[in-house]
Protein backbone atom coordinates (compact mmCIF):
# COMPACT_ATOMS: atom_id res chain seq x y z
CA UNK A 1 0.00 0.00 0.00
CA UNK A 2 2.90 2.38 0.70
CA UNK A 3 3.36 2.91 -3.04
CA UNK A 4 -0.14 4.40 -3.41
CA UNK A 5 0.76 7.94 -2.34
CA UNK A 6 -2.70 9.42 -2.79
CA UNK A 7 -4.35 6.74 -0.68
CA UNK A 8 -1.70 7.05 2.03
CA UNK A 9 -2.11 10.83 2.19
CA UNK A 10 -5.88 10.43 2.62
CA UNK A 11 -5.35 7.95 5.45
CA UNK A 12 -2.91 10.29 7.23
CA UNK A 13 -5.16 13.34 6.86
CA UNK A 14 -8.14 11.43 8.26
CA UNK A 15 -5.98 9.86 11.02
CA UNK A 16 -7.44 6.48 10.08
CA UNK A 17 -6.33 3.90 12.64
CA UNK A 18 -7.38 1.06 10.33
CA UNK A 19 -4.15 1.61 8.40
CA UNK A 20 -1.83 1.45 11.42
CA UNK A 21 0.74 -1.21 10.63
CA UNK A 22 -0.06 -1.21 6.90
CA UNK A 23 2.45 1.58 6.27
CA UNK A 24 4.48 4.24 8.08
CA UNK A 25 4.78 7.95 7.33
CA UNK A 26 8.25 9.49 7.34
CA UNK A 27 8.31 13.28 7.66
CA UNK A 28 11.20 14.86 5.78
CA UNK A 29 11.16 18.15 7.70
CA UNK A 30 11.32 16.61 11.20
CA UNK A 31 13.18 13.36 10.61
CA UNK A 32 10.54 11.28 12.42
CA UNK A 33 8.22 8.51 11.33
CA UNK A 34 4.63 8.02 12.49
CA UNK A 35 1.67 5.71 12.24
CA UNK A 36 -1.19 6.94 9.99
CA UNK A 37 -3.36 7.78 13.03
CA UNK A 38 -0.77 10.08 14.64
CA UNK A 39 -2.70 12.82 16.51
CA UNK A 40 -0.41 15.68 15.46
CA UNK A 41 -1.29 18.07 12.61
CA UNK A 42 -0.55 16.20 9.36
CA UNK A 43 2.48 17.47 7.43
CA UNK A 44 2.23 18.75 3.89
CA UNK A 45 2.03 15.97 1.30
CA UNK A 46 5.33 17.05 -0.28
CA UNK A 47 7.03 16.49 3.09
CA UNK A 48 5.76 12.93 3.49
CA UNK A 49 7.28 9.71 2.24
CA UNK A 50 5.78 6.30 2.93
CA UNK A 51 7.48 3.09 4.00
CA UNK A 52 6.24 -0.50 4.33
CA UNK A 53 7.92 -1.16 7.69
CA UNK A 54 9.38 0.55 10.73
CA UNK A 55 12.72 -1.02 9.85
CA UNK A 56 12.64 0.71 6.46
CA UNK A 57 12.08 4.06 8.17
CA UNK A 58 14.97 3.42 10.54
CA UNK A 59 17.20 2.38 7.66
CA UNK A 60 16.44 5.72 6.01
CA UNK A 61 17.50 7.60 9.15
CA UNK A 62 14.13 8.46 10.67
CA UNK A 63 13.36 8.10 14.38
CA UNK A 64 10.10 7.01 15.99
CA UNK A 65 7.49 9.64 16.89
CA UNK A 66 7.14 10.15 20.64
CA UNK A 67 3.44 10.99 20.36
CA UNK A 68 1.97 8.11 18.35
CA UNK A 69 4.66 5.51 19.13
CA UNK A 70 4.57 3.70 15.78
CA UNK A 71 6.52 0.79 17.25
CA UNK A 72 3.34 -0.22 19.13
CA UNK A 73 1.16 -0.46 16.01
CA UNK A 74 -0.59 -3.75 15.24
CA UNK A 75 1.41 -5.88 12.82
CA UNK A 76 0.69 -5.78 9.13
CA UNK A 77 -2.20 -8.11 8.20
CA UNK A 78 -0.33 -8.99 5.02
CA UNK A 79 1.80 -11.60 6.78
CA UNK A 80 -1.24 -13.45 8.12
CA UNK A 81 -3.15 -13.69 4.86
CA UNK A 82 -0.30 -14.66 2.55
CA UNK A 83 1.79 -17.83 2.30
CA UNK A 84 4.53 -16.62 -0.02
CA UNK A 85 8.23 -16.31 0.85
CA UNK A 86 8.02 -12.79 2.28
CA UNK A 87 5.07 -13.57 4.53
CA UNK A 88 6.63 -16.78 5.82
CA UNK A 89 9.91 -14.95 6.49
CA UNK A 90 8.10 -12.21 8.41
CA UNK A 91 6.29 -14.75 10.57
CA UNK A 92 9.61 -16.40 11.41
CA UNK A 93 11.27 -13.07 12.21
CA UNK A 94 8.36 -12.24 14.54
CA UNK A 95 8.94 -15.61 16.21
CA UNK A 96 12.54 -14.62 16.96
CA UNK A 97 14.29 -16.98 14.55
CA UNK A 98 16.86 -14.39 13.37
CA UNK A 99 17.83 -13.60 16.96
CA UNK A 100 18.26 -17.28 17.80
CA UNK A 101 19.60 -18.73 14.55
CA UNK A 102 20.74 -15.78 12.46
CA UNK A 103 19.91 -15.11 8.81
CA UNK A 104 21.39 -18.49 7.72
CA UNK A 105 18.95 -20.21 10.09
CA UNK A 106 16.06 -18.20 8.62
CA UNK A 107 17.11 -19.14 5.09
CA UNK A 108 17.52 -22.81 5.99
CA UNK A 109 14.02 -22.97 7.42
CA UNK A 110 12.58 -21.42 4.26
CA UNK A 111 14.67 -23.47 1.86
CA UNK A 112 16.23 -20.47 0.10
CA UNK A 113 19.67 -18.90 0.06
CA UNK A 114 20.44 -15.96 2.33
CA UNK A 115 20.92 -13.79 -0.77
CA UNK A 116 17.44 -14.60 -2.05
CA UNK A 117 15.89 -13.84 1.36
CA UNK A 118 17.76 -10.52 1.61
CA UNK A 119 16.76 -9.50 -1.90
CA UNK A 120 13.09 -10.42 -1.49
CA UNK A 121 12.64 -8.64 1.85
CA UNK A 122 14.54 -5.57 0.71
CA UNK A 123 12.41 -5.29 -2.41
CA UNK A 124 9.10 -5.53 -0.56
CA UNK A 125 9.84 -4.11 2.88
CA UNK A 126 12.75 -1.76 2.28
CA UNK A 127 14.89 -3.60 4.83
CA UNK A 128 16.66 -6.93 5.13
CA UNK A 129 16.11 -9.57 7.83
CA UNK A 130 18.78 -8.15 10.15
CA UNK A 131 17.22 -4.67 10.04
CA UNK A 132 13.74 -6.10 10.59
CA UNK A 133 14.96 -8.14 13.56
CA UNK A 134 16.77 -5.06 14.91
CA UNK A 135 13.54 -3.03 14.79
CA UNK A 136 11.78 -5.81 16.68
CA UNK A 137 14.56 -5.91 19.30
CA UNK A 138 14.21 -2.15 19.79
CA UNK A 139 10.47 -2.55 20.36
CA UNK A 140 11.04 -5.35 22.87
CA UNK A 141 13.69 -3.32 24.66
CA UNK A 142 11.36 -0.35 25.00
CA UNK A 143 8.67 -2.60 26.41
CA UNK A 144 11.04 -4.02 29.04
CA UNK A 145 12.44 -0.59 29.91
CA UNK A 146 8.97 0.87 30.44
CA UNK A 147 7.20 -2.01 32.16
CA UNK A 148 9.83 -3.71 34.34
CA UNK A 149 12.37 -2.58 36.96
CA UNK A 150 15.07 -4.76 35.38
CA UNK A 151 18.61 -3.35 35.22
CA UNK A 152 19.44 -2.04 31.75
CA UNK A 153 22.06 -4.73 31.15
CA UNK A 154 19.43 -7.43 31.76
CA UNK A 155 17.03 -5.61 29.45
CA UNK A 156 19.64 -5.49 26.69
CA UNK A 157 20.30 -9.23 26.68
CA UNK A 158 16.64 -10.17 27.22
CA UNK A 159 15.69 -8.12 24.15
CA UNK A 160 18.26 -9.97 22.06
CA UNK A 161 21.10 -7.45 21.84
CA UNK A 162 24.65 -8.80 21.86
CA UNK A 163 26.03 -5.98 24.01
CA UNK A 164 24.88 -3.14 26.23
CA UNK A 165 26.58 -0.65 23.93
CA UNK A 166 24.61 -1.86 20.91
CA UNK A 167 21.43 -1.70 22.99
CA UNK A 168 22.12 1.90 24.05
CA UNK A 169 23.04 3.04 20.54
CA UNK A 170 19.98 1.40 18.96
CA UNK A 171 17.53 2.84 21.49
CA UNK A 172 18.97 6.33 21.05
CA UNK A 173 18.88 6.04 17.27
CA UNK A 174 15.33 4.69 17.05
CA UNK A 175 13.61 6.65 19.82
CA UNK A 176 15.87 9.73 20.17
CA UNK A 177 16.01 8.98 23.90
CA UNK A 178 18.41 7.03 26.07
CA UNK A 179 17.08 3.92 27.85
CA UNK A 180 17.09 5.74 31.19
CA UNK A 181 15.13 8.64 29.66
CA UNK A 182 12.58 6.15 28.28
CA UNK A 183 12.11 4.70 31.75
CA UNK A 184 11.74 8.16 33.33
CA UNK A 185 9.09 9.19 30.79
CA UNK A 186 7.09 5.97 31.10
CA UNK A 187 3.81 6.16 33.04
CA UNK A 188 4.12 4.17 36.25
CA UNK A 189 1.43 1.59 36.87
CA UNK A 190 0.77 -0.86 39.66
CA UNK A 191 -0.02 -3.41 36.96
CA UNK A 192 3.58 -3.51 35.79
CA UNK A 193 5.57 -6.59 36.69
CA UNK A 194 7.25 -6.26 40.08
CA UNK A 195 9.14 -9.56 40.14
CA UNK A 196 11.75 -10.85 37.70
CA UNK A 197 10.09 -12.50 34.72
CA UNK A 198 6.63 -10.97 35.33
CA UNK A 199 5.26 -8.04 33.36
CA UNK A 200 2.02 -6.55 32.05
CA UNK A 201 1.48 -5.02 28.64
CA UNK A 202 -1.21 -4.03 26.18
CA UNK A 203 -1.71 -5.87 22.89
CA UNK A 204 -3.16 -3.48 20.28
CA UNK A 205 -5.54 -4.53 17.52
CA UNK A 206 -7.53 -3.04 14.67
CA UNK A 207 -11.10 -2.33 15.71
CA UNK A 208 -13.63 -3.77 15.81
CA UNK A 209 -12.85 -6.91 17.75
CA UNK A 210 -15.65 -9.19 18.93
CA UNK A 211 -14.29 -11.19 21.90
CA UNK A 212 -17.27 -13.52 22.27
CA UNK A 213 -16.34 -16.41 19.97
CA UNK A 214 -12.61 -15.72 20.31
CA UNK A 215 -12.31 -16.11 24.07
CA UNK A 216 -15.42 -18.29 24.25
CA UNK A 217 -13.82 -20.89 22.01
CA UNK A 218 -10.57 -20.90 23.95
CA UNK A 219 -12.35 -21.18 27.31
CA UNK A 220 -14.86 -23.84 26.22
CA UNK A 221 -12.14 -26.11 24.83
CA UNK A 222 -9.55 -25.42 27.56
CA UNK A 223 -7.52 -28.43 28.66
CA UNK A 224 -7.40 -28.66 32.49
CA UNK A 225 -3.92 -28.02 33.83
CA UNK A 226 -2.81 -26.24 30.63
CA UNK A 227 -5.59 -23.66 30.19
CA UNK A 228 -8.28 -22.02 32.29
CA UNK A 229 -10.71 -19.10 32.40
CA UNK A 230 -10.34 -17.12 35.61
CA UNK A 231 -11.72 -13.73 36.64
CA UNK A 232 -12.33 -12.53 33.11
CA UNK A 233 -9.00 -13.75 31.72
CA UNK A 234 -7.92 -16.70 29.60
CA UNK A 235 -4.79 -18.22 31.13
CA UNK A 236 -2.49 -20.89 29.74
CA UNK A 237 1.04 -22.26 29.89
CA UNK A 238 3.51 -21.67 27.05
CA UNK A 239 6.37 -23.84 25.80
CA UNK A 240 9.04 -21.40 24.60
CA UNK A 241 12.53 -21.66 23.06
CA UNK A 242 14.46 -20.82 26.25
CA UNK A 243 12.01 -22.02 28.89
CA UNK A 244 8.32 -21.79 29.68
CA UNK A 245 5.78 -19.14 30.52
CA UNK A 246 2.28 -18.46 31.78
CA UNK A 247 0.08 -15.85 30.15
CA UNK A 248 -3.21 -14.27 31.15
CA UNK A 249 -5.15 -12.49 28.37
CA UNK A 250 -8.06 -10.18 29.18
CA UNK A 251 -10.23 -8.52 26.50
CA UNK A 252 -10.75 -4.75 26.79
CA UNK A 253 -12.51 -2.32 24.45
CA UNK A 254 -9.30 -0.89 22.93
CA UNK A 255 -6.67 -3.53 23.71
CA UNK A 256 -6.06 -6.99 25.12
CA UNK A 257 -4.35 -6.90 28.50
CA UNK A 258 -1.50 -9.40 28.62
CA UNK A 259 0.20 -10.51 31.84
CA UNK A 260 3.25 -12.69 31.25
CA UNK A 261 5.34 -14.71 33.66
CA UNK A 262 8.45 -16.07 31.95
CA UNK A 263 11.17 -18.37 33.22
CA UNK A 264 13.58 -16.62 30.81
CA UNK A 265 13.01 -13.06 29.61
CA UNK A 266 14.72 -13.82 26.29
CA UNK A 267 11.41 -15.47 25.36
CA UNK A 268 9.46 -12.20 25.60
CA UNK A 269 9.38 -11.42 21.87
CA UNK A 270 8.32 -14.96 21.00
CA UNK A 271 5.65 -15.03 23.72
CA UNK A 272 4.11 -11.76 22.50
CA UNK A 273 4.16 -12.95 18.90
CA UNK A 274 2.43 -16.21 19.80
CA UNK A 275 -0.22 -14.48 21.92
CA UNK A 276 -1.00 -12.11 19.07
CA UNK A 277 -1.23 -15.07 16.72
CA UNK A 278 -3.46 -16.98 19.16
CA UNK A 279 -5.97 -14.10 19.22
CA UNK A 280 -5.57 -13.18 15.52
CA UNK A 281 -4.82 -9.58 16.56
CA UNK A 282 -3.10 -8.57 13.34
CA UNK A 283 -6.20 -9.27 11.24
CA UNK A 284 -7.86 -6.53 9.18
CA UNK A 285 -11.53 -6.79 10.22
CA UNK A 286 -12.64 -4.04 7.84
CA UNK A 287 -11.40 -5.95 4.80
CA UNK A 288 -12.82 -9.25 6.07
CA UNK A 289 -16.26 -7.93 6.97
CA UNK A 290 -16.60 -5.82 3.81
CA UNK A 291 -15.98 -8.91 1.70
CA UNK A 292 -18.42 -11.11 3.65
CA UNK A 293 -21.13 -8.41 3.57
CA UNK A 294 -21.34 -8.82 -0.19
CA UNK A 295 -23.30 -12.02 0.48
CA UNK A 296 -26.82 -10.93 1.36
CA UNK A 297 -27.34 -13.95 3.61
CA UNK A 298 -24.12 -13.42 5.58
CA UNK A 299 -24.46 -9.63 5.82
CA UNK A 300 -26.94 -9.66 8.77
CA UNK A 301 -24.57 -11.86 10.80
CA UNK A 302 -21.66 -9.51 10.12
CA UNK A 303 -23.68 -6.40 10.92
CA UNK A 304 -24.95 -7.92 14.16
CA UNK A 305 -21.49 -8.67 15.60
CA UNK A 306 -18.65 -7.38 13.38
CA UNK A 307 -15.00 -8.02 14.01
CA UNK A 308 -14.97 -11.76 14.69
CA UNK A 309 -11.52 -13.30 14.76
CA UNK A 310 -10.32 -16.85 14.19
CA UNK A 311 -9.18 -18.42 17.49
CA UNK A 312 -5.79 -19.90 16.73
CA UNK A 313 -3.02 -21.52 18.77
CA UNK A 314 0.33 -20.88 20.43
CA UNK A 315 1.63 -24.32 19.44
CA UNK A 316 0.80 -25.83 16.05
CA UNK A 317 1.81 -29.38 16.99
CA UNK A 318 -0.30 -29.23 20.15
CA UNK A 319 -3.35 -28.18 18.18
CA UNK A 320 -2.89 -30.93 15.60
CA UNK A 321 -2.81 -33.54 18.39
CA UNK A 322 -5.92 -32.03 19.98
CA UNK A 323 -7.70 -32.03 16.63
CA UNK A 324 -7.13 -35.78 16.36
CA UNK A 325 -8.32 -36.32 19.94
CA UNK A 326 -11.47 -34.38 19.06
CA UNK A 327 -12.40 -36.42 16.00
CA UNK A 328 -16.04 -37.54 16.21
CA UNK A 329 -16.36 -36.85 19.94
CA UNK A 330 -17.85 -34.03 22.01
CA UNK A 331 -15.88 -31.02 23.24
CA UNK A 332 -16.00 -32.42 26.79
CA UNK A 333 -14.66 -35.82 25.68
CA UNK A 334 -11.82 -34.19 23.74
CA UNK A 335 -10.84 -32.17 26.81
CA UNK A 336 -10.86 -35.34 28.92
CA UNK A 337 -8.58 -37.20 26.49
CA UNK A 338 -6.18 -34.26 26.35
CA UNK A 339 -6.16 -33.81 30.15
CA UNK A 340 -5.14 -37.45 30.63
CA UNK A 341 -2.20 -37.00 28.27
CA UNK A 342 -1.18 -33.79 30.03
CA UNK A 343 -1.23 -35.40 33.47
CA UNK A 344 0.72 -38.45 32.34
CA UNK A 345 3.23 -36.92 29.93
CA UNK A 346 3.27 -33.12 30.31
CA UNK A 347 6.08 -31.21 31.99
CA UNK A 348 5.08 -29.86 35.40
CA UNK A 349 5.25 -26.08 35.96
CA UNK A 350 4.78 -23.87 38.99
CA UNK A 351 1.91 -21.40 38.67
CA UNK A 352 2.18 -18.61 41.27
CA UNK A 353 -1.59 -18.07 41.01
CA UNK A 354 -2.47 -21.78 41.08
CA UNK A 355 -4.71 -23.55 38.60
CA UNK A 356 -2.19 -24.35 35.86
CA UNK A 357 0.05 -27.35 36.42
CA UNK A 358 1.61 -28.55 33.16
CA UNK A 359 2.89 -27.73 29.72
CA UNK A 360 1.16 -29.67 26.96
CA UNK A 361 3.32 -32.72 26.15
CA UNK A 362 5.88 -32.32 23.38
CA UNK A 363 5.66 -34.42 20.23
CA UNK A 364 8.74 -36.36 21.36
CA UNK A 365 7.06 -37.24 24.66
CA UNK A 366 3.83 -38.27 22.95
CA UNK A 367 5.74 -40.47 20.51
CA UNK A 368 6.70 -42.63 23.51
CA UNK A 369 3.06 -43.19 24.58
CA UNK A 370 1.88 -46.80 24.58
CA UNK A 371 -1.10 -46.84 22.13
CA UNK A 372 -2.87 -49.44 24.29
CA UNK A 373 -3.21 -46.85 27.07
CA UNK A 374 -5.26 -44.53 24.84
CA UNK A 375 -9.00 -44.74 25.49
CA UNK A 376 -10.05 -44.40 21.87
CA UNK A 377 -10.90 -46.63 18.89
CA UNK A 378 -8.02 -48.49 17.27
CA UNK A 379 -8.19 -46.52 14.01
CA UNK A 380 -7.87 -43.24 15.90
CA UNK A 381 -4.97 -44.64 17.91
CA UNK A 382 -3.23 -45.29 14.59
CA UNK A 383 -3.97 -41.74 13.48
CA UNK A 384 -2.61 -40.38 16.76
CA UNK A 385 0.60 -42.43 16.78
CA UNK A 386 1.30 -41.72 13.11
CA UNK A 387 0.84 -37.99 13.61
CA UNK A 388 3.06 -37.68 16.70
CA UNK A 389 5.80 -39.84 15.15
CA UNK A 390 5.88 -37.60 12.07
CA UNK A 391 5.95 -34.49 14.26
CA UNK A 392 8.69 -35.91 16.48
CA UNK A 393 11.04 -36.92 13.65
CA UNK A 394 10.50 -33.68 11.73
CA UNK A 395 8.99 -35.25 8.62
CA UNK A 396 5.87 -33.15 9.25
CA UNK A 397 6.46 -29.49 10.06
CA UNK A 398 3.50 -27.36 11.12
CA UNK A 399 5.57 -24.25 11.92
CA UNK A 400 4.81 -20.72 10.76
CA UNK A 401 7.32 -21.10 7.91
CA UNK A 402 5.30 -23.85 6.22
CA UNK A 403 3.44 -23.58 2.94
CA UNK A 404 -0.26 -23.97 3.69
CA UNK A 405 -1.24 -25.96 0.59
CA UNK A 406 1.74 -28.29 0.84
CA UNK A 407 1.23 -28.92 4.56
CA UNK A 408 -2.48 -29.61 4.07
CA UNK A 409 -1.63 -32.17 1.37
CA UNK A 410 0.83 -33.89 3.72
CA UNK A 411 -1.80 -34.05 6.44
CA UNK A 412 -4.33 -35.61 4.09
CA UNK A 413 -1.79 -38.30 3.22
CA UNK A 414 -1.72 -39.50 6.84
CA UNK A 415 -4.09 -42.33 7.86
CA UNK A 416 -7.27 -41.10 9.52
CA UNK A 417 -6.94 -37.53 8.21
CA UNK A 418 -9.97 -36.42 6.26
CA UNK A 419 -10.80 -32.94 4.92
CA UNK A 420 -12.34 -31.74 8.21
CA UNK A 421 -9.25 -32.54 10.32
CA UNK A 422 -6.82 -31.13 7.74
CA UNK A 423 -8.87 -27.96 7.26
CA UNK A 424 -9.41 -27.25 10.95
CA UNK A 425 -5.63 -27.56 11.44
CA UNK A 426 -5.09 -25.28 8.45
CA UNK A 427 -7.52 -22.73 9.89
CA UNK A 428 -6.44 -22.66 13.51
CA UNK A 429 -2.84 -23.96 13.56
CA UNK A 430 -1.39 -22.95 10.20
CA UNK A 431 -3.31 -19.67 10.15
CA UNK A 432 -4.78 -19.99 6.64
CA UNK A 433 -7.52 -17.30 6.49
CA UNK A 434 -9.20 -19.10 3.60
CA UNK A 435 -9.49 -22.55 5.20
CA UNK A 436 -13.07 -23.80 5.00
CA UNK A 437 -15.05 -26.57 6.71
CA UNK A 438 -17.98 -27.48 4.41
CA UNK A 439 -18.42 -30.89 6.08
CA UNK A 440 -18.56 -29.49 9.63
CA UNK A 441 -21.90 -30.22 11.26
CA UNK A 442 -22.20 -26.76 12.81
CA UNK A 443 -21.42 -25.05 9.52
CA UNK A 444 -23.94 -27.17 7.59
CA UNK A 445 -26.63 -26.59 10.23
CA UNK A 446 -26.07 -22.82 10.13
CA UNK A 447 -26.08 -22.82 6.34
CA UNK A 448 -29.44 -24.59 6.26
CA UNK A 449 -30.95 -22.11 8.73
CA UNK A 450 -29.75 -19.14 6.69
CA UNK A 451 -30.92 -20.53 3.38
CA UNK A 452 -27.41 -21.28 2.12
CA UNK A 453 -26.69 -24.60 0.40
CA UNK A 454 -26.13 -27.24 3.07
CA UNK A 455 -24.40 -29.97 1.04
CA UNK A 456 -20.58 -29.70 1.09
CA UNK A 457 -20.14 -29.36 -2.66
CA UNK A 458 -22.84 -26.73 -3.10
CA UNK A 459 -21.75 -24.79 -0.03
CA UNK A 460 -18.12 -24.78 -1.24
CA UNK A 461 -19.27 -23.39 -4.58
CA UNK A 462 -21.27 -20.64 -2.85
CA UNK A 463 -18.35 -19.85 -0.54
CA UNK A 464 -16.07 -19.03 -3.48
CA UNK A 465 -17.40 -15.46 -3.24
CA UNK A 466 -16.12 -15.25 0.36
CA UNK A 467 -12.50 -15.88 -0.58
CA UNK A 468 -9.89 -15.22 0.75
CA UNK A 469 -11.70 -14.97 4.10
CA UNK A 470 -13.65 -18.24 4.35
CA UNK A 471 -12.16 -19.07 7.78
CA UNK A 472 -13.86 -15.92 9.10
CA UNK A 473 -17.11 -16.90 7.41
CA UNK A 474 -16.92 -20.14 9.44
CA UNK A 475 -16.78 -18.07 12.64
CA UNK A 476 -19.92 -16.16 11.67
CA UNK A 477 -21.73 -19.39 10.74
CA UNK A 478 -20.72 -21.10 14.00
CA UNK A 479 -21.96 -18.06 15.93
CA UNK A 480 -25.57 -18.82 15.00
CA UNK A 481 -25.50 -21.78 17.38
CA UNK A 482 -25.95 -21.71 21.18
CA UNK A 483 -22.78 -23.72 21.83
CA UNK A 484 -20.57 -22.31 24.66
CA UNK A 485 -17.75 -21.62 22.19
CA UNK A 486 -19.73 -18.64 20.93
CA UNK A 487 -20.11 -16.80 24.23
CA UNK A 488 -17.70 -14.93 26.46
CA UNK A 489 -17.63 -16.87 29.75
CA UNK A 490 -19.33 -15.25 32.72
Image: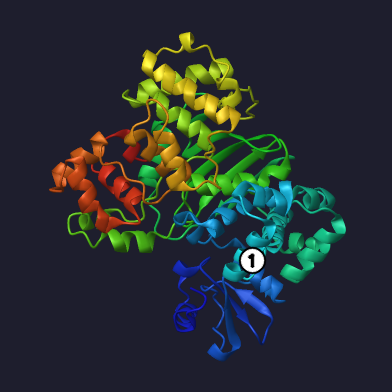
Rendered position, 27 above or below 293: below
Q: Position of residue 354 (x, y in %)?
A: 59, 26
> Which residue appears farthest toward the top when viewing the image?
372
Is the residue marked by circle 1 packed among few (<14), some (14-19), or many (20+) residues within 10 Å? some
Q: Describe the element under mark 1 as helix, strand or loop.
A: helix
Asked if residue 457 lies left or right of residue 227, the reply is left
Rendered position, 96 above or below 208: above
Asked if residue 102 lies left or right of residue 465, the reply is right
Rendered position, 465 above or below 215: below
Q: Is any part of residue 68 visible from this angle? A: no
* Structure colour scheme: rainbow
Rendered position, 246 above or below 14: above
Quarter the C terminus occupies? top left
Q: Position of residue 119 (x, y in %)?
A: 64, 66
What residue is drawn where x is 23% and y is 43%? Answer: 480
Q: Position of residue 322 (x, y in %)?
A: 44, 28
| Number of numbered discs on residues | 1
Q: Quadrant of residue 297?
A: bottom left
What residue is drawn where x is 34% and y is 32%? Answer: 418
Q: Position of residue 9 (x, y in %)?
A: 48, 82
Q: Nearer the viewer, residue 194 or 414?
A: 414
What residue is drawn where x is 67% and y is 58%? Answer: 136
Q: Is any part of residue 227 visible from this angle? A: yes
Asked if residue 35 lies left or right of residue 173, the reply is left
Asked if residue 268 lies left or right of residue 313, the reply is right
The residue where tag 1 is placed is 119
Q: Nearer the viewer, residue 210 or 334?
A: 334
What residue is drawn where x is 52% and y is 75%? Answer: 2
Amino acid sequence: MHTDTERCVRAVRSKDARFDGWFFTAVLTTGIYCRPSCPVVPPKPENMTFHPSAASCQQAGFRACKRCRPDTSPGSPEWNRRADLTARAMRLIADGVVDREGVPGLAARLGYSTRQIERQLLAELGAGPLALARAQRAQTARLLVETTPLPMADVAFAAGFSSVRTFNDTVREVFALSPSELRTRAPHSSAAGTTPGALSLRLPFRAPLNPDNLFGHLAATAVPGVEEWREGAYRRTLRLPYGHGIVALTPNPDHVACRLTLSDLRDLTVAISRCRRLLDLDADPAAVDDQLRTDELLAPLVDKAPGRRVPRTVDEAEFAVRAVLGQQVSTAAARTHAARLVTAHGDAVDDPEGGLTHLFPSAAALAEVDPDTLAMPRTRRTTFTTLVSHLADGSLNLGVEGDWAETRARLLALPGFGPWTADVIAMRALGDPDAFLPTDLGVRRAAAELGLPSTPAALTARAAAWRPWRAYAVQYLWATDSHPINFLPV
